[in-house]
Image (cartoon, rainbow, N blue to C red):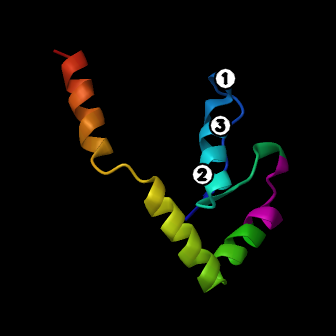
Amino acid sequence: PAILIPSHNVTDNHQYKNALVYAEKGAAVLIEEKDLTPQRLIEEVKNVLLSPEKLRKMSEKMKELAVPGATDAIWEEIKKLTK
């Protein structure tokens, strides 16, 4: 599970778009920077951590979105580009 706070200062707002995929699938909580306050973050952390069922469901959804071997595949592509 994750609480994602994408930066709005990136090209084409790609961090928000990526975070939205996780939030829509139920794997993460999305807080836009403009809505971020210490109290909001504390509330979201409590909501996730104090609800074993929510934590379990978010964990399952995150696992469904995982791409096994992605780190190795990215590293191999980087190595190809640097030869």
For the question of whether residue 4 can be seen, the reply is: no
For the question of whether residue 54 can be seen, the reply is: yes
Label 3 and label 2: CA atoms lie apart by: 9 Å
- Tell me: residue 17, above or below residue 61: above
* Label placed on residue 12: 1
Quarter of the view holding residue 37: bottom right
Q: What SS does tag 3 mark?
A: helix
* Label placed on residue 76: none
Q: What SS does tag 2 mark?
A: helix
Is 64 in front, or is 52? 64
Q: Give the range drawn in magenta.
A: 35-41
At x 20%, y 20%, the residue is 80
Q: Does the magenta stretch include residue 39?
A: yes
Instruction: Check contact, mark 1 vs mark 2: CB within 8 A.
Output: no
At x 67%, y 39%, the residue is 16
* Viewport quadrant of the N terminus: bottom right
Residue designated by label 3: 17
Residue 58 image offset from top left, x and y in percent: 57, 68
Amino acid under disc 3: Lys
Main SS, magenta residues? helix
Residue 10 image offset from top left, x and y in percent: 64, 27
Instruction: Check contact, mark 3 vs mark 1: CB within 8 A.
Output: yes
* Label placed on residue 22: 2
Instruction: Name the N-terminal-most of marks 3 and 2.
Output: 3
Amino acid under disc 2: Tyr
Quarter of the view holding residue 29: bottom right
Instruction: Name the N-terminal-most of marks 1 and 2.
Output: 1
